[in-house]
Image: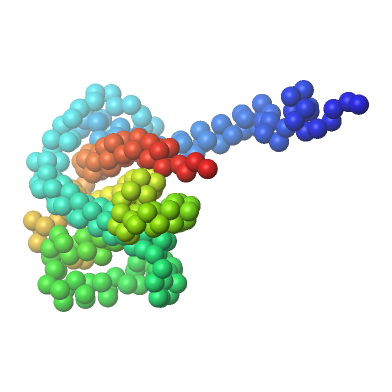
Amino acid sequence: MARTDPAHRRRRGGGSFNTVSPGERALRYTLLLLVLAITISPFLWQLSTSLKSLSEDIYTSTPTFLPERPTLDNFVEVARTIPVWSYAANSVVVAAIVVTGNAIGATLAGYALAKLRFRGAKLLLGAFLATLVLPEEVTIVSKYVIVRDLGLADTLPGVALPGAIGMLNVLLMRVAFSSIPPEMDEAAIIDGATAWQRLRHIGLPNVRGMLSVITIFAFIGAWDDFLWPLIVLNDPDHYTLTVGLQYLNGTFTANPRLIAAGTMISFLPIVIVFASLQRFFFKGVAEGAIKG
């Protein structure tokens, strides 16, 4: 009798659900290249503008993508126009507080919701989910009143406080901890391990990938935030980089080259952080995989 099992048909080339035709593969790559072009084109255009000299006309009807005479004078002029390094230091302080708060607070809250049994856990989880429905603009007035009453208005901690623990990050960590088989915790409990020991030796090694994700997202959110620092801060010496860059746009005139150079200066730390942590992200996912 001839063999007709699916495995035999696949070995003979009789077809498979995973087979991709050349036309479908070409369509996939075309769509990926289209999305890539749409995503990075604004960044490349800003980079090109920041490198163009004053002698180049950027308003011509047929603009050139590559600078004719590339120069770094625009970046020097940005530093001469505004205290860009002071603003960048303020942004670093805010980002450090936000990243530390999310890395510690979201990890502890996510572990408690996923692995600890206590009264009101489902109610707290529902409250966390409910906060995701509200847009930031709805709560911005109440956040400012709280920060002002705490005496943190016009301070860098006041800028960082509302984002110190993101509800989405808590839920992401909860999902990561929930993916750990309960049998591992049960075995540790039988061996006499405390909750802190289970978190340190079982939980954290298996969620390093997700921890890298929330670290990247927390840094980008804190570094790029513009509206909240603009509301909280009054003293120009306390401005973060995104708020301070508004001084590059004059009341009556503006040099697009300086604005583009300032944008590149603001964007560079994000590239550095992501490039530094992406390998830990993939390594953490691989090392944290649970093998049955």
Whether 33 is drawn above or below 111: the answer is above
Nearest the viewer among 65 and 100 is 100
Nearest the viewer among 30 and 286 is 286
When asked about the image quadrant of residue 79, the answer is top left
| Identity of the residue furthest to the right in this view | 1
When asked about the image quadrant of residue 30, the answer is top right
Which color scheme does this rendered protein use?
Answer: rainbow
Report the residue at 52% width, 35% height from top: 32
Whether 141 is drawn above or below 205: the answer is below
Report the residue at 43% width, 53% height from top: 187
Quadrant holding the N terminus: top right
Report the residue at 25% width, 31% height from top: 52
Where residue 31 sits: x, y (%)? Answer: 56, 36
- On the rendered structure, is 255 left or right of 200? left
When asked about the image quadrant of residue 53, the answer is top left
Where residue 186 sits: x, y (%)? Answer: 44, 57
- On the rendered structure, is 179 left or right of 255? right
- On the rendered structure, is 142 left or right of 156? right
Where residue 116 sits: x, y (%)? Answer: 39, 64
Where residue 56 sits: x, y (%)? Answer: 26, 30
Is residue 125 visible in the rendered image? The answer is yes
Report the residue at 43% width, 37% height from top: 286
Total numbered labels: 0
- On the rendered structure, is 283 left or right of 100? right
Is residue 227 visible in the rendered image? The answer is no
